Amino acid sequence: GLPLATALPGAAWAQKKIVLGFSQVGAESEWRTANTESIKSAAKDAGIELKFSDAQQKQENQIKAIRAFIAQKVDVIAFSPVVETGWDNVLREAKAAKIPVVLTDRAVNTKDPSLYVTFMGSDFVEEGRKAGRWLVDKMKDQKGEVRIVELQGTVGSAPAIDRKKGFEEIIKADPKFKIVRSQTGDFTRAKGKEVMEAFLKAEGKNGINVLYAHNDDMAIGAIQAIEEAGLKPAKDITIISIDAVKGAFEAMMAGKLNVSIECSPLLGPQLMTAVKDIVAGKPVAKRIVTEEGIFPMETAAAEFPKRKY
Ligand code: AHR
């Protein structure tokens, strides 16, 4: 049909609310809950009508949601793709229906970048590098082997692939660093605990020096497993994780987590700005990168009151 601005007379156009369809990954972590909250409140503040759908960590549910948004003729579709691959067909359907698509938080792997307008979110490879650099520095005087276990995020997701890649890129410079076990904990506390229990069983009490968890929730679950095994988290096993959610600050203040690398979930306001610009026909940058810090446990008490998620 005609663009809204031409199809409706002035007054009606001014009153017409922008409708945004958003397909969320799920509610797997504290990060995700904060992200959902940020999107919902930013939509409200911006006067944008939000159709929100939770995919419960399943790609098929996201594809269904996107198809439903196309059928409802929303103005813009935004989504945070649970995994990287397998989106081309549904994105082509959106393009054919002339509905612009925005990627938030996680990227897709596609040969056709015209299938989305912009991708806003963190540089996950850089987060992995930050984790690696922190560890290399912390262990610089260590002579023997450093035995690392890794709790990966959701299989096939951009943050799991990229955080692994960035971390390995840094630690491979010194052969004393060895990833002895690496398995997915699906970004959840329950899985993080379960997999850490298995790691401890397989490697024995003295077989693990470092835990690298792709998010705070899995680290928090793993801390429980470590304590239940009679070990001291952050002392017997150095623990690094990503997100810097409040739960991680609490763990750091309790002396149980060594460092959290920041990944900001507060993407709502910039998403709404992009949506408005897209509808108004203004140009939008193809990539919008989130700025983020690093919080070692020594900084936790001072930073905690300032944290917004
Ligand atoms: O895509 C971002 C990741 O997804 C967060 O780091 C993790 O906590 C979430 O589940």
Image (cartoon, rainbow, N blue to C red):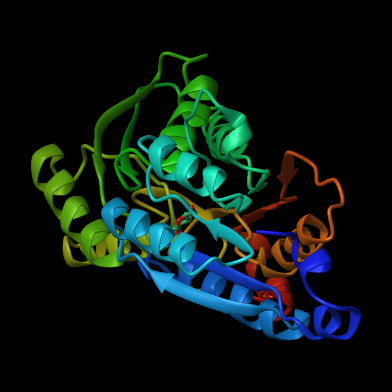
Horizontal placement of 63 versus 258: left or right? left
Q: Is residue 41 above or below residue 182?
A: below
Front position in the image: 275 or 30: 275
Task: Tell me the quarter of the picture where residue 123 sits.
Answer: top right
- Residue at image position (77%, 79%) is 46
- The one nearer the camera, 41 or 234, is 41
Location of residue 269 with respect to 116 vertically, above or below: below
Q: Quick one: 93 or 226, which is closer to the camera?
A: 93
Q: Residue furthest left?
A: 201
Residue 274, horizontal then vertical, whole percent: 76, 58
Based on the displayed image, in which of its 4 quarters is residue 287 positioned? top right
Q: Residue 300, position in %: x, y?
A: 64, 68
Q: Is residue 259 left or right of residue 203?
A: right
Q: Quadrant of the N terminus?
A: bottom right
- Residue 112 in view (yes/no): yes
**Residue 272's quadrant in the figure?**
bottom right
Count the labels in the image.
0
Q: Work out which quarter of the rendered image holds the C terminus and state it.
A: bottom right
Q: Tell me if 298 is positioned left or right of 5 in this view.
A: left
Q: Name the residue located 26 percent from the left edge and 52 percent from the top edge.
A: 185
* 193 to 112, vertically: above or below: below
Q: Which residue is at a point 16% across and 60% down the rendered structure image? A: 229
Tell me if 282 is positioned left or right of 184 in this view: right
Residue at screen point 71% across, 71% down: 303
**Image x and y of residue 171, in percent:** 49, 23
- How far across and how far down the image is residue 151, in percent? 31, 45
- Foreground pick, 233 / 36: 36
